[in-house]
Amino acid sequence: MRKPMRRTVAVVLLALVASLLGVVTPGTAYAVESMPEMQWTPVAATGYPQKLVSGPQGSVTLPCNIENGGSDLKTYNGSGQLVRSLPRTDTIDGVSNCITSPVVDKNGVLYGFPYSSEGESVTQGPNLLAYEGNTLKWKYPAHCGEAWNKSPLTVGADGNIYTVTQDSNGGVHLIGLAPELAAGQTQPTKVLDISIGGSCASELIAYKDGIAVGGWPTRFSSYGGKFLGDFPGGWINADGHTFTTGYVAGLVQSFSITKYD
């Protein structure tokens, strides 16, 4: 009977030692995970690195910069090869072709509004531009608000392109554009046009069922144009769930997170 008991005690001691070894005490050195492998040789770039725009195919775009001497828009593929370069010295629709806030769709097509800057004056071009590589694929008239405003832009979960525009009476509309041109078209088909009121500077947030127009409140609409309701701010994920925070018992450093569907 004693031999089995000795084996049991030995097993327990080994388990205890193993658990103690797994505890890292203050000052104890432990192995650091190895650095990830660099995927391509770094390339020299200027502009705002915090504004990098990633593409679903592994590309990365450094938007054009109109400040501090400026820099051209450049796109690199997943291997680090330069696949798009749009010179800001080119003129399109009367303004410098400097796209400062682009978006990229699943096919690598880039969309954005060109901007020019002269001193304190910033001018947005009158058209939304679509570029396939370095080739202008199409342009569509869309402009909203004062010249210094940057019209919001996003790619929907349905693959269409969404932005805002302003009618002759000053009303703000959310519009959706099909990314591909039909035979004989020079402009894309408008698949959505709904009045949203609010500001031209509203943020557009795409989720699986529609578009949220950020503001106070945030307005939710389906891709078919059905108004789904308003919600007072918050963060929205790809499923359309909204998260808000609130302080707990008035403490600045303690807060709760609430999720809404």
Image (cartoon, rainbow, N blue to C red):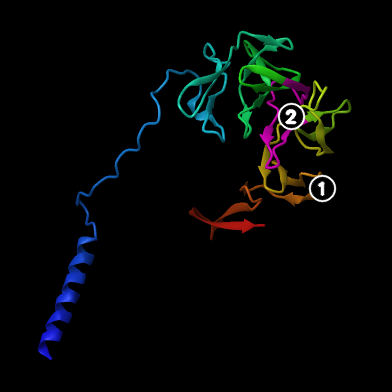
Q: Is residue 156 magenta?
A: yes
Report if residue 22 is visible in the image. yes
- The reply to whether dot 1 and dot 2 touch (C-beta < 8 Å) is no
Where in the figure is residue 61, as x and y percent of width and height?
A: 54, 25
> Of the residues shown, which amino acid type is indicated by label 1?
Lys
Q: Range of the magenta residues?
A: 138-164
**Seen in the image, is 252 located left or right of residue 138?**
left
Report if residue 217 is visible in the image. no
Q: Quadrant of residue 8?
A: bottom left
Kindly identify which residue carries mark 2: 180
Q: Is residue 177 magenta?
A: no
Q: Which residue is at the far front?
A: 183
The CA span between labels 1 and 2 is 24 Å
Where in the figure is residue 211, as x and y percent of width and height?
A: 72, 43
Q: Which mark is residue 226?
A: 1
> Of the residues shown, which amino acid type is indicated by label 2?
Glu
Which element is circle 2 on? Answer: loop
